[in-house]
Amino acid sequence: MTTLQSGPDSVYDVLGIGFGPANLALAIALHERGAAPDRGAALRAGFLERQPRFGWHRGMLIDDATMQVSFLKDLVTMRDPTSDFSFLCYLRERGRLVDFLNQKTLFPLRVEFHDYLEWAAARVGHLVEYAAEAVSVRPVTEDGEVRYFDVVSRDPAAPGRPTVRRARALCLATGLEPRLPPGAVLSDLVWHSSELLPKVERLTRSGRPVRRAVVLGAGQSAAETVDYLHRTLPDAEICSVFAKYGYTPADDSPFANRIFDPEAVDLFYGAPAEVKQSLFDYHRSTNYSVVDMDLIESLSRTMYQERVQGRQRLRMLNVSRIREVEAGDRDVRVTVEFLPTGAREQLTADVLVYATGYRPQSIGDHLGEVAKLCLRDDEDALRVGRDHRVETASNVTAGLYLQGATEHTHGLASTLLSTTAVRAGEISSDLFARHSARVPHE
């Protein structure tokens, strides 16, 4: 097991909090750049991850689900097509390169891409400490300047007492957290879609019969949940509840996809606030509350076939909302309102799944008092430079970089894989430039 050094005498040039795809891409960029002898002295980098091992949306690794972005938008290719951390190099090492090419697809299975991420994470495993949850960050002041951050974590190397690591810069990439309707309470019968696979497995092992499952949501995860439950629970009625008339197809057309180009980040960053909002509104259909057309057509075919056969297990309760949820010990009573008429129907279900998406975690949840040193705009959003570095008070020389919580400054691709490799390269370059400027004076 890797153990990162701790204590005020062990100063990291950059310490990453969270080790999903974003900080994994940064770890690779730092590793590759530090390994090149013509690039100058290597940075001292480390990463903390609260999970016991690498994992990325494990609860939705449905066996036949595919990625929604091209494999070429992996951890490195957009930054450096010659990197041996690419998805193609992974395929070559796994002995599947020719087989994958014969599939004639840009979109690998999600389980395969997850295996690629695990493969890449293992290769930079010396940089990360798993089962290490950052619980607070403290500013360290010297001569009136905040020059370092002390990261306090609960570590497997020191059970029962916190570990402190000091860093000149932090890179926060703690990912997304499940979004739930107001007042929603999770239980053995009420889930978020992020827990789908382990919850279904536990339900199947229990032997408890499932007569009806209700799924709330209109996006890709909702449609995938409906399809998976329909296939996995052959005796159950699956009810999909959403406020739209029907699922909206994802706009993955060539021109719309340009919103995820690296150049689009430059344009978005420099645009006036009203233009940013317009671009976000125009292109929501590339990512939010939308479903792949193939899945929409598959669900529609299933519904029609069931109507022909006279046994309809798949129900679409469209233009509807869930108004009340009453969870008991053995079932959940869900009141659904049909919005055009106000008519209400009470469904007695064995399972209720909120497929209601995700939201960025609050920076204050991780930074504590350091969050007070960060500057904010007129909308109370963090001010973030084009280099992904948070703007801070004038007496703060320690750096704070964000990955994934910058839609308001860097656009729609902020939380997606599309620009992960490029962003990692930009942060890496900024860190090395500042390191090179500082080293001669130390």
Image (tube, rainbow, N blue to C red):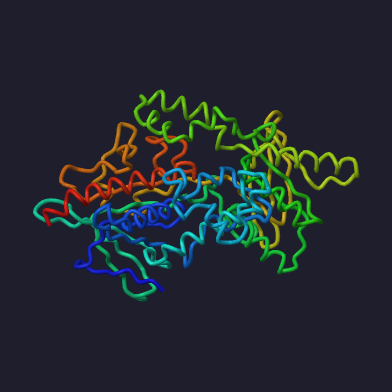
Q: How many marks?
A: 0
Between 167 and 324, the one nearer to me in the picture: 167
Between 194 and 328, the one nearer to me in the picture: 194
- Residue shown at 36%/49% (left/top)? 363
Q: Quadrant of the N terminus?
A: bottom left
Between 373 and 92, the one nearer to me in the picture: 92
Q: Is residue 159 left or right of residue 304?
A: left
Q: Is residue 396 left or right of residue 247?
A: left
Rendering quarter of residue 387 = top left
Rendering quarter of residue 43 = bottom left
Instruction: Please state the horizontal and vertical placement of residue 180, each as a whole percent of the image.
Output: 54, 47
Instruction: Please state the horizontal and vertical placement of residue 408, each as a whole percent of the image.
Output: 39, 35
Q: Is residue 181 visible?
A: yes
Instruction: Please state the horizontal and vertical placement of residue 411, each as a whole percent of the image.
Output: 43, 35
**48 up-or-down from 284: above or below:** below
Which residue is at the far right? 309
**111 up-or-down from 67: above or below:** below
**266 up-or-down from 129: above or below:** above
Q: Quadrant of the C terminus?
A: bottom left
Rendering quarter of residue 14 = bottom left
Q: Is residue 383 visible?
A: no
Instruction: Please state the horizontal and vertical placement of residue 348, each as a whole percent of the image.
Output: 74, 52
Q: Is residue 216 left or right of residue 373?
A: right
